Amino acid sequence: MLWPVLLRAEQDFFVVLQYHHVSNDAPASTSVRIEQFEQHLSYLADNGFHVLALDDALQAVQQGKPLPNFSVAITFDDSYRSIYEHAYPRLKQRGWPFTVFVNTAPMAEQQPWAIRWEELLEMQANGGLIANHSVSHPHFPRREATDWKPWAREEIRQAGNTIQRHLGNRPTLFAWPYGEYNPMSQSLLQELELTGFGQHAGAVSRYEDFTALPRFAVNQRYANLDTLADKLRAKPMPVQDIHPDNFVLSADNRQPRLDVSMAEEAPPGGWQHALQCFVSGQGMVSPTWLNPNSFRLQAPASLRPGRSRYTCTARDSDGRYFWFSRQWLLPNTDGTWPKE
Ligand SMILES: [Zn+2]
């Protein structure tokens, strides 16, 4: 494929924000407070960001068309009413598009905290794209069963059917619950012709796998504008090769090695000079360089059971950071999964 020569005010990637609740009385790990959300929107408006519809921005990246500099898409996961009550009116007021990934079971069960179909219809008519987040919000890669594939296919297909029945449109976008996926679930998503999103950090670009695209999680821990400012301006790390391609670990692989090769376009001084890597719960970790564009990262101590991340950034000459991350999933030492 031919990639366009970009003008100064254009880029060939964009950043996706992932919110859950927008509410003053929800758990800090899955919410931002209403005033924090307002601050974020004001920051985007005051600092030259372009808030784009997720499907339009994706299409541009897939077709190699340029996007405006500082392009951002806003997404919400799960079928929480607080999205309709607190986020939607503020987005509508600004005329900004957004995407809501809904899991359909809580709506079918008419949970008191769940959003309603008529509310989704109203949002759909006012800039909201309603997308697929499965029926029951399962941990896809944790289930070991001979019927895995038919089960997983129905989780995704039925949610699509239900959304289509109520809203008239069949979603083409899907978000992995907990950002958990493995190669088997990725190939299923490909069969279903859906584009998938995880919850590892980074920018959406041609360097990423379209069955598990990165997003920046925003919650009360990460709502601070100092750290969010760098994420909103993040650039994609030009990754050419990653090994392994399965981030679900076996019980005896508790300090996984990750080998990453990058394209030659590098920040000033080269990758070796600029790259900084971090391991969840273990702080900064120095990578081992295999050659000037390839490094190996390995946690110095065992990862905790459950989800953890390797994250690398590198500051470019314009002050923006190249950003790369992957989320590991590790069972307990006896092979069982930690309770959540
Ligand atoms: Zn979710």
Image: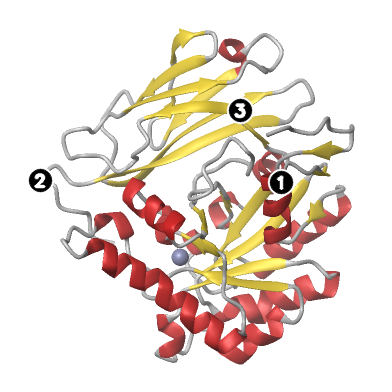
Mark 1 residue type: Gln
Mark 2 residue type: Asp
Q: Secondary structure at mark 2?
A: loop
Q: Nearer the viewer, mark 2 or mark 3?
A: 3
Residue 303 location (% of width, % of height): 29, 36
Q: Is residue 305 above or below residue 89?
A: above
* Callout 1 crowding tier (Cα within 10 Å): few <14, some 14–19, many ≥20: few
Q: Nearer the viewer, mark 1 or mark 2?
A: 1
Mark 2, residue position: 334
Q: Is residue 9 left or right of residue 119?
A: right
Q: Residue furthest left?
A: 334
* Callout 3 crowding tier (Cα within 10 Å): few <14, some 14–19, many ≥20: some
Residue 318 location (% of width, % of height): 79, 25
Mark earlier in primary sequence (1, 2): 1
Q: Which mark is residue 63?
A: 1
Mark earlier in primary sequence (3, 1): 1
Q: Secondary structure at mark 1?
A: helix
Q: Residue at x 32, y 50 (%)?
A: 184
Residue 66 location (% of width, % of height): 80, 42
Q: Residue at x 40, y 37 (%)?
A: 280
Instruction: Confirm or reject: label 1 Cβ below 8 Å from ligand 1.
Output: no
